[in-house]
Structure formats: C-alpha cells, structure tokens
Amino acid sequence: MDALLAALADPARWRLVNLLAERPRPVGVLARLAEARQPQTTKHLQTLERAGVVTSRRSGQRRVYALRPDPLRELAAALSRLADTADRAGGPRETFDRYGVSLQAERLAAEEAGWADGRSFRFVRSLAGGPELVWRHLTETSLLARWWTPEDLRVSELVFDARPGGRIVLEYRDAEDAGDSDPVAGRGEGVVEDVRPGERLSYRLSPLLPDGGPAFTAHVTLGLRPTSTGTDLDVQYQIIDSTVPSADFVAGIEIGFGQSLDKLAANLAAQHPGASNTPNTDVTDVTHDNDTRSTK
C-alpha cells in the first residue's frame, strides 16, 4: 500500500494513470498525451509497474501499458474505511466539530472582561455505587486521576486536598504523549471550599492561560444523593471573573466536563457490573445573566 500511495502521489504519474484508465496505450502515445519526454514517461511507468498498479506487454517494437484496477479498488476500500472510522457517530471527529462550533460562538461573544460571568452549567449522572464509594472517586487523587480529564487526555499532575482551604492542582496532557514531548494540554489551580463527606463537595478552580494568569474561576458544587441503585450526582458549575482569552476554555466546558463525568460513571459501573448506570447528559443546561439556553 505504501508503494502504491508513493507512486500515485506524483502528479505526472497520476496523469498517466488517468490516461491508462481510458484504455491501454504505448509509451510514445502516453508521452505525447501527457506532454512529457518519452524517457521521463518510461521511468514513471516503471515506477507504477513496480507499485503493481500497471502492467506492460511488448508488442513488436512497442511496449504497451495497461492499468490494473484491483489495487485501486483496494486503495479505495482502505480510504473508505478510514473515512468511516473518522466519521463514526459519537466519535472523536464529531466531538472535534462540536467544539469548533462552540469555539467560534464563544470567541464572538468574548468582547470584554466579564463576558461569561454568571454562565452556569448543570450535569447530572446516576452512578453505580453508594455515596461513600462515589465520594472516594471525587476526593482521592488515585481515583480522581482515572477520570478527571476529557477523552484522549491523561492527568499528569494532581493535587486534591479534600478539606476546606485545601489546595487543588490539575494538569493534563495528551493521552498518547507518554514522553511529555508536547506542551501541557491544560492546567488549573484552585481551592476546596466545602466538604461534607458523602453529601456535598464544593471547590473553585481556575484554568490557567499560557502566561500563567487565570482564564476564569469556576465555582463547582457536587451534590450526592443515595438511591436504590447507587447515587445521583448533581453538579453545578458557575463562571466568574472571565477574561477575553477564556473563550477557548469556556467553549470546551460542556463537552470536556461531561466526558470526564462519563468516565467516572464508567469506572464505577466497572466495579458494579450488574448495577444500572445512566449518564443523564440530556439535562446539561447553560445559563447567562441575561439569557438562558438549553443544550441537549
């Protein structure tokens, strides 16, 4: 496949493939139609033949070349599979496009400091496991690190001191950046505000801009309620002190925090295979001071 792709990448050879798709042709005719010199055309045809996409036969004083369609069909099938993989419903490409739409809207809205103040998001999840187990996943760094990032990211540094006034640090990188060769994907710093084990946890967290300053401050409150099948988790997320550059961060809150909670739900479900575990993503709300929107 690599040899075929390399052979077809040259515009002159691609022109010859198009001519041979019409019918087999001798070298001289191909050179004339391609407006190229014959020795050059011969070299291109030899490359295509080595790649398996054309075949040739000597007829008298001429060498006639013909296209072999099967390799092209195999390449087309491989490209189609790649396109289907990228375009699958609910896949990373769909998330990428959703973020792009949100990013454009938020950048247009970010005209001055404070532009997103009062914006709030709500996330609700019905989780497997009782409040005590869920609480551990919310406060113990070894368990937090397994879920407190969006998809395709990993926690690279985490501090969570689960007491009033306790320090929070969350840094994350691309999940495939094992050697830390790429820049940090994101970093946030904050402080724990309220701790009621098994019932309520609140904290404030500020994602940091490239210059180290806060993009905005998020006040996050997580309420836990026991149910017959596990625990209902209700998350209230409110923005204050928003800066103009915070648009890139705000655009990703609904997707990124929602994906993190989905990972939490999956981790808890894995510990309780028979339990119901329903991610209620359809109740995520977005509100503004002077405007209310519901995102389903």
Image: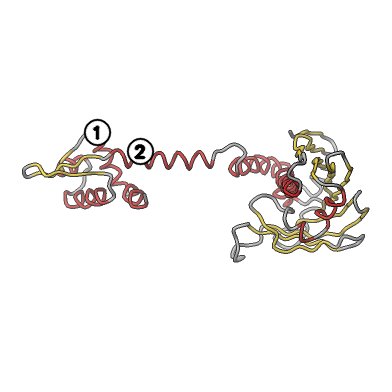
Q: Name the residue under label 2.
A: 73
Percent across and percent down for residue 58 are 11, 44
Percent across and percent down for residue 121 are 80, 42
For this orientation, the residue located farthest to the left is 60
- What kind of residue is marked 1? Glu
Q: Residue 22 carries which label?
A: 1
Q: Can residue 223 be seen from the camera position used here?
A: yes
Measure the alpha-carbon separation of dots 1 and 2.
16 Å
For label 2, the SS is helix
* Depth order, front residue of 219/179: 179
Q: Which residue is drawn at 26% across and 36% down?
A: 21
Dot 1 or dot 2, earlier in sequence: 1
Percent across and percent down for residue 78 are 42, 42
Q: In this view, does 96 lie above or below 183?
A: above
Point out the frontmost of discs 1 and 2: 2
For label 1, the SS is helix
* Depth order, front residue of 268/154: 268
Q: Residue 173 carries which label?
A: none
Residue 74 lies in what quarter of the image?
Answer: top left
Q: Residue at x 74, y 63 (%)?
A: 212
Q: In this view, does 168 lie above or below 256?
A: below
